[in-house]
Amino acid sequence: MTESKVVKDLMIDVFEYPHVPYWFTIKQAIMVIKKSLIETEKCFHPLAILIFDEKYNLLGTLTMKDIMRGLEPKFMRTPTEKAQVSEEESSLYLIWDTLFTKESKQLAEKPVGDIMVPAKFFVEPKDPITKAAYIMIFRDLGLLPVLDDKKKFVGLVRMIEIFDEISNAILKE
Amino acid sequence: MTSRNSHNISTTTLEQLNRQNYRKLYVQLYEKIRKKIEDKEWSVGFQIPTEKQLCEDFKVSRATVRSAISELVRQGYLTCQQGRGTFVSKKVISDKLTMFTTFGELFLEAEIGFSTDVLAQTIMMPVDDLADKLNISGDKHIIYIKRLRKVDNKPILIQETYIPFHICPPLLEEDVKKNSLFELLEKKYEIQITGVRNYIDVTYLDVDEGRLFDLSESSPALVLTQHFFSGETQIMYMRSIKRPNSFVFLIEFEKKIGDDRMNYKFSKL
């Protein structure tokens, strides 16, 4: 049953994901994603890299979506995170298209620390997977770090394993 | 010529390779064979066991045996004769001749008066040309260590070290402020450094390097890049930038009578 499973049962190794320090540029992060995930066909979801500080403390995560957002020309940025896109905005796509390569090349020199999603939420290996599921759903996270009782980063929980576990329980009933 | 049968290598005469050891199997095999040669147990002209025999004796793959043998050939311990076999070479190069200087002296690791700030000890992926420099694929994790060496509290050396994570995972948590990397690798983790390739060049400081040395960006500085090998595997890449006018590198060559190989000594003045 789902209730009996704990995070440790679903946790994956941190080395499944590429690691980069926060001072790497967005351009370098793109190269890492290409080399480590796309060229090796390790395209499991979410496609992400982990960002660390100088002492190997986890600072945050960076997905393809975060990178695309980081490369978006400034004037195109919407005031709210989840702005509605309407049909009338199609003309903006054209402007975006012309500016994308020019301004985005400059933006790609920014450090990844500026655009990562900070790691604020964690679970422990002995936590029930329902706790991990709750945090991931309500915080809109595809990847959740696991810290042990000494606050050491020991693994990751992904939505795909959580979904698989919960769906199995539902299908059984 | 000594016959092969009289010196048959077997599991009863040589202990098996340690599969829990961080050192690769072929490096362990290389060391065992080298020891036999250095101890004169296998004398000059001795025909060593076949690849097949070594595979069976040590329960390793043919690729492992070939790597060990080719390293011994490269270092002059063995010679391969087409269609005949592999023999102990007439001219054996001893370990001391190729690397007689201690690593502490050679690599500015244990100089008296150095103090060290560890600026980073973390993990990264190989970007730019780092994968080529370490001879690894682009999806391998790397331990990155950046240290600032000071004398009398004055920064004189910025040292960046890159080690493939799989070579020595515990190094990530070691105290590299107090301990020499070479001592950790060789003594604690038994990863023997058998070769090093040094390049000396001039570089221009970037913003961070200039700030660490309290010099302006683009100031010229000497850079020493080093590739370290254990057998044929590259285990580490190190880049050391020296503060201008702080010290000079000395490279001293020595040639022993009767030996065609040049040896060098490298130290700080």
Image (cartoon, coloured by chain):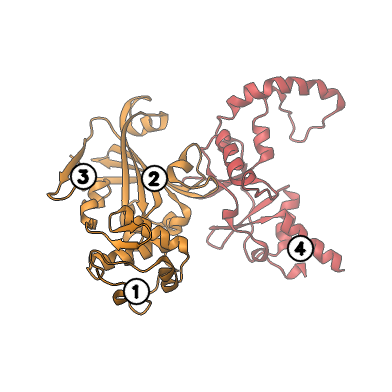
Closer mark to the observer between disc 1 and disc 4: 1
Mark before the other along the chain sequence, 3 or 2:
2
User: Mark 1 belongs to which amino acid?
Assistant: Ile
- Chain B's colour is orange
Residue A96 x/y as whole percent? 72, 23
Q: Which mark is residue B9?
A: 1
A35 vs B108, left or right, is right
Which residue is tagged 4?
Answer: A165
Q: How many marks?
A: 4
Check the residue under mark 4 and report the chain it is in.
A
The quarter in which the N terminus of chain B is drawn is: bottom left
Q: CA distance from mark 1 to mark 2?
A: 36 Å
Residue B179 seen from this side: no
Residue B38 vs residue B166, the one in the foreground: B38
Q: Which residue in the protein does label 2 denote?
A: B237
Both marks 1 and 2 on one chain = yes
Q: Does B232 sit above or below residue B248?
A: below
Q: What residue is disc 3 on?
A: B264
Residue type pointed to by label 4: Glu
Q: Residues within 10 Å of mark 2 (few under 14, many from 20)?
A: many
Looking at the rendered structure, the kind of residue marked 2 is Tyr
> Quadrant location of residue A32?
top right
Q: Chain of mark 3?
A: B
Q: Secondary structure at mark 2?
A: strand
